[in-house]
């Protein structure tokens, strides 16, 4: 079968957390004293979240004044679909622990590390907690860094391909559909969002073979399109 239940061939919670953090360009940070929006200031290095904080920012001042040189913090990342769709927020990742200075400085920038104590991901209306060791033992998905550009290109320039792929869903999913969007992409395949006059529904569209990098996606899409050509029937708008 090409279209499978959402829990078949899915990223693990730990992989999804790593993927969201790797792809994110910003995060929200909450401490006992304040909340901050940090843009282009984080990386994951040596099993820790690393923040590069300019010396002249309120967060740097709070860190300097923190008792015992440690600052409890909650980092939150929001995973947003890169294409226009109903309910674009796909997941939220929460990482909590203690921020400490790394002992190194770079051009008036304080390097802070978050020693992770708890990790969780909110998705599809539920929160799953993941042990920190599992988070760092996992890696981001093979397409985590390319997903946004690839989905945007597909949606903007090749929506006819999306329409053809959408025919692979079950008839009850296609019935009454108004539009279809390429909502998510990982090494196992696509998640297509079927939008109706009222509401929406997602369908998982699996590649025949999981990809190892972005260069292999085209071959898998062609294989899916070949299957779609032999699929009979469909909704009016597909």
Image (cartoon, helix red, strand yellow):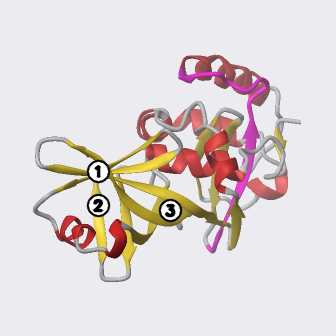
Q: Which mark is residue 38?
A: 2
Q: Is residue 65 left or right of residue 181?
A: left
Circles 1 and 2 in contact, beta carbons < 8 Å: yes
Q: CA distance from mark 1 to mark 2?
A: 6 Å
How far from the left and from the top, in percent, is residue 206? Answer: 76, 36
The C terminus lies in quadrant: top right
- Give neighbour class at mark 3: few <14, some 14-19, many 20+ (Cα, 10 Å): few
Element assignment for label 2: strand
Q: Which residue is mark 1?
A: 41
Q: Quadrant of residue 223?
A: top right
Q: Which residue is mark 3?
A: 88
How far from the left and from the top, in percent, is residue 219? Answer: 65, 16
Element assignment for label 3: loop
Element assignment for label 1: loop
Point out the stretch of residues depicted in magenta: 198-214
Going from N to C along the chain, the mark reached first, 3 or 2, is 2
Q: Is residue 232 left or right of residue 79?
A: right
- Give neighbour class at mark 1: few <14, some 14-19, many 20+ (Cα, 10 Å): some
Q: Which residue is at a point 24% across and 73% down the rendered structure image?
A: 62
Between 146 and 200, the residue placed more toward the observer is: 146
Between 24 and 171, the residue placed more toward the observer is: 24
Circles 3 and 2 in contact, beta carbons < 8 Å: no
How far from the left and from the top, in percent, is residue 78? Answer: 47, 62
The N terminus lies in quadrant: top right
């Amino acid at each position: 079968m090409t279209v499978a239940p959402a829990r078949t061939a899915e990223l693990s919670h730990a992989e999804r957390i790593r993927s969201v953090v790797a792809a994110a360009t910003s995060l929200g940070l909450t401490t006992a004293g304040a909340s901050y929006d940090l843009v282009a200031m984080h990386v994951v290095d040596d099993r820790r979240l690393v923040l590069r904080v300019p010396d002249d920012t309120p967060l740097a001042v709070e860190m300097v004044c923190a008792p015992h040189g440690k600052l409890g913090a909650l980092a939150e990342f929001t995973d947003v679909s890169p294409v226009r769709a109903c309910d674009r927020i796909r997941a939220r990742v929460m990482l909590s622990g203690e921020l400490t200075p790394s002992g190194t400085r770079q051009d008036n920038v304080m390097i802070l590390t978050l020693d992770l104590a708890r990790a969780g991901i909110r998705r599809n209306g539920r929160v799953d907690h993941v042990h920190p060791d599992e988070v760092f033992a996992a890696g981001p998905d093979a397409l985590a860094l390319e997903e946004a550009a690839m989905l945007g290109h597909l949606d903007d320039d090749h929506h006819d391909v999306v329409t053809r792929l959408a025919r692979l869903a079950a008839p009850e999913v296609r019935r009454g559909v108004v539009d279809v969007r390429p909502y998510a992409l990982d090494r196992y395949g696509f998640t297509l969002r079927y939008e109706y006059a009222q509401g929406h529904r997602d369908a998982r569209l699996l590649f025949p073979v999981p990809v190892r990098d972005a260069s292999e996606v085209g071959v898998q899409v062609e294989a899916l399109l070949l299957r779609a050509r032999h699929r009979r029937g469909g909704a009016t708008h597909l």
